[in-house]
Image (cartoon, rainbow, N blue to C red):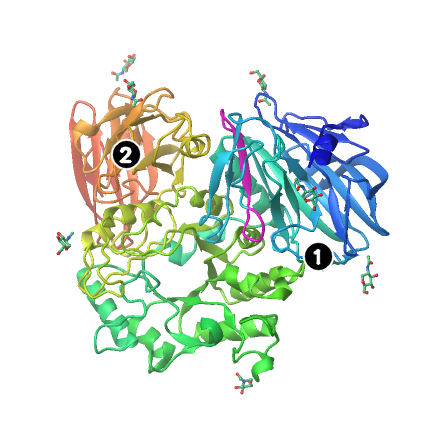
Amino acid sequence: MGHIFLLLLTWLGVVTAFSPTDTNPINLVVDQASGGFKLNVPNSTLSFNSADIFFQVNGKLYSTADGSLLYTTFASGLGTDPLGKYQYKSIHWQAGGVRVETYYRYYMDAPAVVFGQHFPDGANGTSVGNQEHTCTGFPTIALEGQAGLLAYLSFGGNMFGGASIGAGEWYYQTTGIRSGITGGPLAIFDRTLHTVVLSPFSQFMAASVWHNGTGGGTFGGEVNYGIMGDVENIPPNFDYQTILFYDKGINQALHEWGGTLMKQYGKTRARTESDFASNYIGYWTDNGAYYYYHTESGKNYEETMVDVMAYTKEAGIPYRYLQLDSWWYYKGVAGGVKTWDARPDVFPNGLRALYEKIGLPIVAHNRYWAKDTTYAKQNGGNYSFIVEKQSTTSMPIDMMFWDDLFTQSAEWGLIVYEQDWLDVEFKGLKATLSSTSLGKQWLMQFGQAASSHDLNIQYCMANPRHALQSVQIPAVTQARVSGDYHPGNEQWRIGIGSIMAHALGVRPYKDTFWSTTNQTGSPYGHATEPYPRLQAAVTTLSAGPVGPSDMVKGADVKLIMRSCNAEGLLLKPSRPATAIDLQIAQKAFQLDLGPKGEVWTTYSDISGFRFGIILAADLQVDWNITSVTAGFGEMMFGMAFTLPFTTTSLTPFGVASENLLLKQCGKDDFAVWYTSPFLNLLTNKTVMIIGETDKWVPMSPQRVTNIHTYGDTVELSLTGAPGEVVTMSYGIESKGWMETKCVLDEAGTATLNINKETCY
Ligand SMILES: *[C@@H]1O[C@H](CO)[C@@H](O)[C@H](O)[C@H]1NC(C)=O
Ligand SMILES: *[C@@H]1O[C@H](CO)[C@@H](O)[C@H](O)[C@H]1NC(C)=O
Ligand SMILES: *[C@@H]1O[C@H](CO)[C@@H](O)[C@H](O)[C@H]1NC(C)=O
Ligand SMILES: *[C@@H]1O[C@H](CO)[C@@H](O)[C@H](O)[C@H]1NC(C)=O
Ligand SMILES: *[C@@H]1O[C@H](CO)[C@@H](O)[C@H](O)[C@H]1NC(C)=O
Ligand SMILES: *[C@@H]1O[C@H](CO)[C@@H](O)[C@H](O)[C@H]1NC(C)=O
Ligand SMILES: *[C@@H]1O[C@H](CO)[C@@H](O)[C@H](O)[C@H]1NC(C)=O
């Protein structure tokens, strides 16, 4: 350790700096001889030193620490790639007899640096015999310095990196960085929220982040970016990149980082935004649901699902799809999927008959493939699979398999293929852990097949590596971001996990919930859901799927209808609600920087007006929020209020320094604040729109498609179901607060003229 520490401090002197631009303020200096770097961001305490570069080749570690990685040449110049123009510096090395290259790309038009590892000849014997390590290291970043200056947020585990989020101070004794196979993107920020995000930028399934060495003296080891430790060889011309992206604000930096990945790989948000199962309410039967491996007594699943749909229709809940969980297909070894088809004891008439009876499209779950799956050639099936002696799972490596599977499922109404257990499927095989390409090939194959069959995909139990890979898979439109729901559990805390899902262009899913507290005879003993309102609010504000799972006659119809319009279209905000920066800073620094509890924000942007939403839950002490700390930016001056609407909750809000007091609260008395700007008319009359007070999002772009202000007139274009009654509330200066009932026409539209207090 002492040896490494000395080397870290040895700056060999042959330094060469990149030139910051108006867009890229990062200061980056490279030492030509050691290949290392120093990086900092002006006006912040963000400052990093590199550690040693290493490559495992032919069973031996070649490192700059002991000089075994031999420097050969240095080059620099200019280039262009999908991210734009860059300055580059590259260093060629010899690892034994094998050529490797490390390079830096410093972008002129993006606040980003890309670090690359290149293998012109490939490399053999790369495994270090530990899947949680990396077999290569560049960049490697030293964990050093004192506490109190920097902190980190580290995504990890499954559920798109939302299941095991780490946060704490970044200094020489840091331990909580999510590392190895389940490790993920890392945001590092200072007390003023200047933030850098670090993550793989290519080869997402093969790359890992590895934090090795902790707590020796004042050097806390290093954070290494490289290839998974069990990879056995690297093919010729293999190239791996890591990105470092800078911005002000944690949410902002992560959002822009994600946007940069999406741009690099050509993924857009359009498909996610038009995803049917993220836009309409659906009925769920997964873990936590009332009907999970559980039917009405004396009835089979087909009869139970038909009863659920009949009940909910009569009750007035416009469910638009049905989710079928793992209870309907054949299981094999270790609970894996043997055949993805309906068992006769579950659906005696098959899936097609169910689809015809309920008349709704299907979201269907799938697990990991069992070793004895009937599809594999090894088991007498028709398709190529990887099956290993020592493993209980298997993996399809045959495009035809997916095409055939999805051709069949089109017959029974599949619209979303929910691939669960992504982490177990990946980690279950030696082949995936030891290959640079297999993990990617697997995800790309079912992603491409889904696209050609017009299916979308929900990722469940995805590690960050799967999450990052989804930027190359347009069909992935939704992802679970927290653990499985069980009545009464704590998996609703998705405010931080949703940041990553949104950044990468997929809709975060909270999972199902019960809309009423007591549902007797459930598969969960005497479990109850004490906070159905919180569940409903969180899932609606997530802008992702909303999927209740109540027993027949057990739904709170009014509560469920707070989420959607009369035909089940979700009335959501413009973007998922996410934890504010100061909540994350509070969690990481443990100072009095931010709220002690959940404070998430989102908004609806309609015709250039921003309607803010602030959710405060499980807040241990009172805390003041402003439009800036809420992440709304500088808003037009207006008011904040809560629902049900009364004038007593009205609080001025909008100017940067205006404080809105969020009161200490729990999970029952959680608060949702709404903000609305003043609209000033020519007669110097001010108008303020409240919206639909019986919805979680009273002003949703799914309901109000346009706000037209001209002269002394304010008109709202409304949309919804034909004949739907929409009650809009608003205030007019000197007239007071009022509401107008609009009945939508046959096309499902109406225009509300606020001055005339009429709808036409
Ligand atoms: C740093 O602060 C100075 C003074 O406020 C400002 O002029 C400069 O643009 C800032 N630089 C960056 C990169 O934020
Ligand atoms: C790796 O091994 C293969 C197969 O033995 C060989 O053809 C190739 O040249 C080796 N590559 C390197 C870089 O040693
Ligand atoms: C981390 O691992 C690399 C590669 O094995 C090694 O060179 C380095 O010394 C290790 N660092 C610490 C702090 O253990
Ligand atoms: C393999 O394909 C053939 C021809 O489509 C089909 O008849 C047979 O049932 C398939 N075998 C299995 C095990 O699915
Ligand atoms: C749920 O049942 C318990 C026990 O019977 C009862 O005390 C409670 O009031 C019920 N809660 C609701 C919301 O119905
Ligand atoms: C919130 O701000 C108000 C002033 O706007 C101040 O009086 C109050 O003490 C603050 N409360 C907290 C908890 O910071
Ligand atoms: C509105 O207010 C402005 C400034 O106070 C004033 O000049 C103008 O006459 C007012 N307009 C009407 C229609 O009252």
Q: Which residues are magenta?
A: 179-194
Amino acid at circle 1: Ser
Can residue 331 be seen by looking at this rendering? yes
Q: Looking at the picture, how far across and down is residue 616, in whole percent?
A: 30, 36
Residue named by callout 2: 673
- Tell me: 576 left or right of 124: left
Residue 518: which numbered mark, if any? none
Residue 363 found in image quarter:
bottom left
Amino acid at circle 2: Trp
Predominant secondary structure in magenta? loop
Q: Quadrant of ligand 6?
A: top left
Q: Secondary structure at mark 1?
A: loop
Q: Residue at x 62, y 65 (%)?
A: 430
Q: Are marks 2 and 1 in contact (CB under 8 Å)?
A: no
Residue named by callout 1: 127
Relative depth, front residue between 284 and 154: 154
10 Å neighbourhood of mark 2: few (<14), some, or many (≥20)?
Answer: some
